[in-house]
Image (tube, grey):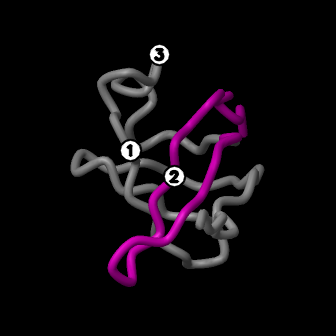
């Protein structure tokens, strides 16, 4: 017998900043841990800048993890 479990991942677009610990601080105060930051093109050059990111969010051990699929620096 096989069971299929619903996946709690969701695709999102959010704005905020990424710090040197690769935590994404969304404008609404939510903190996301960036999954595999070394695979995100342009992330290191964007630390501390305001960004719009798209990605997949999942929750593990009470933490929100974001796998960023694209990012854009927001010019202010």
Name the residue nearer the viewer: 39 or 8: 8
Q: Earlier in the sequence, mark 2 or mark 1?
A: 1
Q: Position of residue 52 (x, y in %)?
A: 70, 42
Name the residue nearer the viewer: 4 or 41: 4
What residue is shown with label 1? 35
Q: Position of residue 13 (x, y in %)?
A: 77, 50
C-beta proximity under 8 Å, tags 2 and 1 = yes
Give the position of the N terminus as an image quadrant: bottom right
Query: For the residues carrying marks 3 and 1, which lies nearer the camera in this image?
Result: 1
Residue 5 to residue 20: above or below: below
Label 3 – label 1 distance at C-alpha: 13 Å
Q: Secondary structure at mark 3?
A: loop
Q: Kindly identify which numbered label has been placed on residue 66.
A: 2
Q: Secondary structure at mark 1?
A: loop
What residue is shown with label 3? 41
Question: In the image, what residue occupies the spot 59% across and 58% down?
Answer: 57
Question: In the image, what residue occupies the spot 46% across and 56% down?
Answer: 24
The span picked out in magenta is: 53-76
């Amino acid at each position: 017998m096989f069971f299929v479990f619903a996946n709690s991942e969701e695709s999102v677009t959010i704005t905020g900043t990424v710090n040197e610990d690769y935590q994404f601080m969304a404008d609404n105060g939510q903190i996301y841990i960036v999954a595999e930051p070394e695979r995100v093109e342009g992330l290191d050059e964007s630390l501390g800048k305001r960004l719009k990111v798209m990605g997949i969010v999942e929750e593990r051990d009470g933490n929100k993890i974001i796998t960023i699929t694209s990012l854009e620096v927001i010019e202010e």
